[in-house]
Structures are given as C-alpha cells and as structure tokens.
C-alpha cells in the first residue's frame, strides 16, 4: 500500500516541475541545423571590441607631462626656476658677447685700421715730398715758391701721419714709429743740406740728396710697410673674432634658453590640458625669439662689414696708396735721369719699365673704376711727356730737357704739370678709398647692440615666464 502510494506521488508533477520548462536535449545545443539555438548572454557582447586610441600630439604631451615625477606644486615651482635661470644665463652670455664684439671692433679700428692708414699716408706723402725734392738736382737749388710750398706740405703731412700712428700704436709698435720719426728728421735735414750746396753750385748737393733718398727706400718705406701689415693683420683678427666660435656660442646659448622656455611651456600645457600654457609664457617666447633674431643679425652684419673692410676695401685703399707712391717714384727716376746729364739711359729705361708695370697694375687694381680710369689716362699723359724729356736729352739738349721736366718752357707742356695732374688724381683716389674704408668700419660699429639690451630682454622674458608658470600653478594646488 505504501509502496503503491509512493509511486503515485512520484508520478504527479509538483509545483517546481510546473514552473521549470523542460530542458532541451543536449544534441539540440551542439548540433547545427534547424531547431532551437542558445541566445547570447546579457553579459557577453558579440560586438567588435573597441581598442584604446594610441593618442594624438596633445595626448602624448599630456603623458610626457605626467611622467615628470614631481608633485603638482613642486612641478610648477621647478619649471619656473628652470625657465627663469635658462633665460637669465642666455641673456648675460649674449650681453657679454655684444660687449666683447664692440670692444674688438673699437680696437681693430684704432690699432688696425687707423695704424695702417696712418703709416700708409706717411709713406705716400714722403714719396710725394721726395719727388718734389728731386727737382733740386736739375734746378740748381732754386725752386719756385709753389714747389717749395708743396714740399713743405708733403713733409708736414708725413709728420702728421706719424703722429696719428703714434697715438694708436701699441707698445710693440712704438719702436718702429720712433725710428720712422728719426728717419723723417734725418731725411729733411739731408734735403736742406742738398739744397744749400746746390744753390752754391757744389756738386756734393746731389750726393746729399741721393743719401736722403737711400734712407727713405732702405729704412722708412720698409718700416711703414711692416706697420701697415701689422694693422691689416689686426683687422683680419677682428673679423675672425667677431664671426668666430665665441659669437656662435652666444647664439647657441640663446637658442638653448628659447628651447628650455618652449619645453617648459609644453609641459605646463600638458599637465593642465591646455593648448596655450599661459599668455605670459607666450609673450616670453616672443621676447626671446626677438632677442635671438636681434643678436644673430647684429653678429652677421658686423662680420660681413668687417670682412669687406679687411679684404676688398682695404685692398683698394692699399692699391691706391701704392699707385700714388709708385707715381712719385717714377717722378724721382725721371728727375734722376735728367740730372745724369746725358748719361741716364739706364734710368730712362727703368722709368719706362716701371711706368709699364704701373699701367698694367692699374687695369687690374681694385677700387673705384672711374678713379682708376682717370689715373690711367693721366699716367699715359705723364709718360708721354717724360718721353719727350728723354728725347730732348738724348739729342744733347740737357738744359732743354731739364726745363721741360720742370715745365718752365713757355711753348711746351712739361712733364712736371702732367705729373701734378696725375698725382692729384692719385691723391683723390687715396682719399676716396680711405673714406670708404672708414665708412665700412662705421657701418660695422652701427650694427652693434648695447650689451644691456639682450640682458634686459632676457630678464623680461624670465620674469614673464616665471610669473606665467606660477600663476597657472596656483589654480592646480
């Protein structure tokens, strides 16, 4: 009875069985084909999983800013100190280089340019004086007032050149300057002795004049040439100094300060998630960029002007002085040939050779083309007049040759007038090229900047940078 009752109870569905749906067969869950399919779970999605973005420039900047292992407060303070220090150091370095370049240009102008031009003027005026003094050989010691006044003016100008050289000379130069001053006094004394003896008809006057000329050629001209090369070397050293690695160092330091400022601004923008870290940082960046451009342009302009002065302009000035000196030497050779009284064939040949060489050099000499063309034409006129002097002397008319050389014949233009015309043009060329050389140095000095300017600008940028960083940091404590 009980067993039968238990079987009956087991066959009757209970409440749980009524609520639970029948389970499908296992095969229905695994095999394909028609039939019921398992629905996706509410937890597991069948959509394509979305990968995390690699990040753009802004995200990379933010990650870089947050990699700095500093708390926020210390982060802002540290960047403010770094930016201010970098800008201050770069400004001081640029100011020091600006002061150094200005001093270098001043020294190059005084101890280089002014020394070279002073001794060149000394040599040129001394050669002109010697050319006028040579007339004593064929005038019997009797000179017209104009020639005498010209000689005195040339000697005085040579003396002034030595004075100018002494004012700018260094201790190493003073010995040469002193020897040139002594030599000039000895030369002037010998010329006066030659004049006195020639006026009295003593032939020893010519010997005194030859001795005076020997002192010029053997002592004074070599000393003047050496001092001129010293001045040229100092100008070349100034070019190398201004355009050298020290000036480049100032530019590099300014670039480094600007890079440090920009990097600090980038870190601030990344930490605060802003495109512009702070307006003050932007202003500091613009100030430093302007300072860098100002210093770089000043150094570039100074180097360009000094290089042109030490090469092209100086070469033109030296060429003009050489042409003037050699023209005077031609005059001395011509007078000496006439003074030989029919025995100056070798001197006449030397005159012709030197005149041909000078003419060839004028065609290739640097300088103002118009001035060189005028001197070329005047030199041709002078050499033609000297040829007429030689022709008359070779025909046995030495007195007529002397009169023609002194331009005292009323019916013929002598070589003295032609020489004076050529010498005037040569002197004008020297003055023109000297003025151009001075102008070039003035242009180099004008492009200089006051040393306090980059220091002040960099200091302003440092204050702006520090203020901008700290102001932004106060909002992120």
Image (cartoon, rainbow, N blue to C red):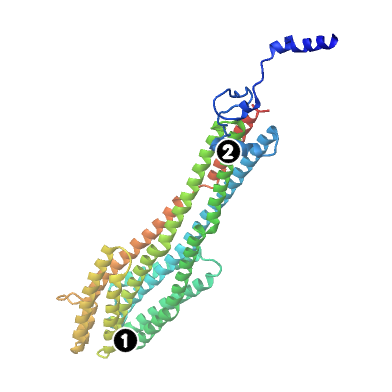
Is residue 141 in view from this perspective?
no
The crowding category of the residue bearing disc 2, from other C-alpha atoms within 10 Å (few below 14, some 14 to 19, many at least 20), is: few
Asked if 18 appears above or below 309 in the picture, the reply is above
Considering depth in this image, is 122 or 63 the residue closer to the camera?
63
- Residue beneath label 1, please? 201
Residue 384, horizontal then vertical, whole percent: 20, 77
Secondary-structure class at tag 2:
helix
Residue at 52% over, 58% down: 104
Q: Is residue 46 left or right of residue 379?
A: right
Residue 140, horizontal then vertical, whole percent: 29, 82
Asked if 149 appears above or below 42 in the picture, the reply is below
Residue 259, horizontal then vertical, whole percent: 56, 44
Considering depth in this image, is 252 or 118 the residue closer to the camera?
252
Sequence-first disc among 2 and 1 = 2
Residue at 47% over, 63% down: 235
Looking at the rendered structure, the number of numbered marks drawn on it comes to 2
Is residue 51 in view from this perspective?
yes
Asked if 467 appears above or below 115 in the picture, the reply is above
Image quadrant containing the N terminus: top right
Task: Name the residue furthest right.
Answer: 2
Front: mark 2 or 1: 2
Q: Which mark is residue 285?
A: none
Residue 245, horizontal then vertical, whole percent: 54, 58
Secondary-structure class at tag 1:
loop
Image quadrant containing the C terminus: top right
Considering depth in this image, is 1 or 368 the residue closer to the camera?
1
Q: CA distance from mark 2 to mark 1?
A: 103 Å
- Residue beneath label 2, please? 60
């Amino acid at each position: 009875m009980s067993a039968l009752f238990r079987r009956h109870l087991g066959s009757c569905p209970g409440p749980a069985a009524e609520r639970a749906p029948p389970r499908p067969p296992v095969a229905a869950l695994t095999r394909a084909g028609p039939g019921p399919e398992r629905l996706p779970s509410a937890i597991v999605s069948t959509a394509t999983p979305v990968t995390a973005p690699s990040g753009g420039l802004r995200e990379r900047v933010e990650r870089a800013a947050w990699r700095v292992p500093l708390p926020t407060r210390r982060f802002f303070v540290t960047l403010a100190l770094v930016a201010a220090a970098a800008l201050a150091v770069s400004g001081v370095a640029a100011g020091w280089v600006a002061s150094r370049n200005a001093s270098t240009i001043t020294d190059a102008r005084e101890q280089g340019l002014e020394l070279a031009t002073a001794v060149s003027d000394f040599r040129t005026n001394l050669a002109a004086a010697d050319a006028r003094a040579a007339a004593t050989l064929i005038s019997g010691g009797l000179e017209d007032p104009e020639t005498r006044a010209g000689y005195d003016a040339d000697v005085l100008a040579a003396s002034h050149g030595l004075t100018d050289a002494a004012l700018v000379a260094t201790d190493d130069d003073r010995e040469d300057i002193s020897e040139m001053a002594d030599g000039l006094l000895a030369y002037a004394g010998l010329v006066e002795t030659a004049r006195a003896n020639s006026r009295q008809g003593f032939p020893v006057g010519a010997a005194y004049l030859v001795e005076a000329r020997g002192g010029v050629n053997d002592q004074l001209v070599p000393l003047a040439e050496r001092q001129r090369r010293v001045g040229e070397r100092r100008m070349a050293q100034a070019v190398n100094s201004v355009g050298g690695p020290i000036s480049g160092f100032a530019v590099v330091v300014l670039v480094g300060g600007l890079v440090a400022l920009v990097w600090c601004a980038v870190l601030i923008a990344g930490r605060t998630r802003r495109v512009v870290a702070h307006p003050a940082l932007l202003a500091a960046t613009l100030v430093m960029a302007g300072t860098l451009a100002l210093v770089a342009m000043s150094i570039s302009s100074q180097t360009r002007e000094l290089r042109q002065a030490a090469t092209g302009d100086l070469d033109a000035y030296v060429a003009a002085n050489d042409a003037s000196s050699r023209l005077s030497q031609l005059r001395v050779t011509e007078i000496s040939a006439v003074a030989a009284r029919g025995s100056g064939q070798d001197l006449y040949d030397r005159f012709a050779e030197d005149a041909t060489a000078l003419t060839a050099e004028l065609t290739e000499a640097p300088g103002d083309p118009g001035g060189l063309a005028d001197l070329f034409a005047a030199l041709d006129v002078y050499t033609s007049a000297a040829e007429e002097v030689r022709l008359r002397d070779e025909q046995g008319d030495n007195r007529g040759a002397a009169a023609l050389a002194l331009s005292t014949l009323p019916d013929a233009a002598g070589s003295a007038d032609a020489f004076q015309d050529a010498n005037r043009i040569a002197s004008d060329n020297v003055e023109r090229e000297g003025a151009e050389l001075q102008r070039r140095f003035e242009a180099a000095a004008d492009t200089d900047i006051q040393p306090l300017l980059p220091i002040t600008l960099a200091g302003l940028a440092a204050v702006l940078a520090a203020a901008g960083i700290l102001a932004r940091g106060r909002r992120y404590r």
